[in-house]
Amino acid sequence: MHIICKILLIYVNYIASEYYIATMQDSLISILIPFKNTEAFLDECLDSICKQTYTQWELLIVDDHSTDKSYSIVKHYANRDGRIRLFKNEGAGIIDALKLAFSKSNGNYITRMDSDDIMPKIKLETMLNKLQHFGKHHIAIGLVRYFSLEGLSDGYKRYEHWLNGLTLTGSNYSELYKECVIPSPCWMIASEDLVAIDGFNPTRYPEDYDLTFRFYEANYSIIPCNKILHYWRDHGKRASRTDSNYADNSFIDIKLNYFIKLEYNSIKTLVLWGAGTKGKTIAKKLIAHRISFHWVCDNPKKIGKHIYDIEMKSYLILSTLNQTQTIVSVANKDEQAKIKNYFSTLNKQPMIDYFFFC
């Protein structure tokens, strides 16, 4: 009897071990990080990953031709922890680095991280639990907190407040055409869902905004979150500050291309509201696409004038048009509130009848 009990115990332990291994494999998280010349921040970033409460992860980290000590810093971590796998970018830029990292990944779940940022220790665990609860075709995100040793600008504070307000309710897509509504280093998705939308294969910048639009196009749902899951560092050498791929015109191109692809209805009358710099840029691009539109504003000094051979009209003509789609390029928050109220009087719906592009 004693021998039988031992055999049963060995068998039970074997089954439990096999189940544990299979479960871990099913829940492996692949973290993708491109890096370039971030030696000052890598220790904090990598330490925050190593301290995660959820430990079943692999880090695919790609050096994008650093000229400082970044590579040697990461190499030191990789030598100490087998979960960290270091590569050198075969191409150039963030997208090529992300493609390489994703091609080397084994996880059932994929997340991205920036090499100058910090993870709260519950980040991976929290996001994984949400995805396992809600299932495929969902995206886990979290609240973000900007920080900087040099002090934060009002612009970053406003962006953080705006983005977190959307994330609390999972209503991020509702303001998709304003700005990127999913923080690039704070999302997680099932690997097969990322493959289904072609992953990082399109070479279109800003890559995070393009990916967000493809999530939206695929009808993937965003899971609400009320926890800070990412500390986002601002500093003078951030790619978003220094790389021309993240200039305003790149954002306008992304917005307009997806608007034409996903929203534009040629049966309806297209209206462009606003004659500032962004309005003029959008107008030129619509003309280049050979898409006709009415151009309106509420500035008496501009009404009646011609810009690019198009007469500027009063916004009040919207009340005389039956079926319209309006792109709003007015950035002032107070003016945006007035515009929303005006559309409400016309029974117009956001993301159906009108779209804020800033």
Image: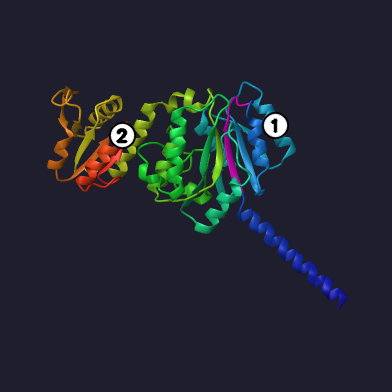
User: Residues under labels 2 and 1: Cα distance?
Assistant: 51 Å
Q: Is residue 105 visible?
A: no
Residue 253, percent from left and from top: 34, 32
Q: Nearer the viewer, mark 2 or mark 1?
A: 2
Judging depth in this view, the residue of 325 and 334 nearest the camera is 334
Element at label 1: helix
Residue occupied by mark 2: 334
Which amino acid does the dot numbered 1 rest on?
A: Lys
Give the magenta range.
29-39
Q: On the image, which quarter does residue 353 sit in?
A: top left
Locate the N terminus by quadrant.
Answer: bottom right
Locate the C terminus by quadrant.
Answer: top left
* Label 2 vs 1, first from the N-terminus: 1
Residue 278, percent from left and from top: 30, 27
Q: On the image, which quarter does residue 113 sit in?
A: top right
Majority secondary structure in the magenta region: strand
Which residue is rendered at x = 49% and y = 38% of the image?
A: 184
Q: Is residue 312 visible?
A: yes
Q: On the image, which quarter does residue 252 sit in?
A: top left
Which amino acid does the dot numbered 2 rest on?
A: Asp
Q: Is residue 59 left or right of residue 156?
A: right
Residue 42, percent from left and from top: 64, 31
Judging depth in this view, the residue of 227 and 44 nearest the camera is 227
Residue 4, percent from left and from top: 83, 75
Element at label 2: helix
Residue occupied by mark 1: 75
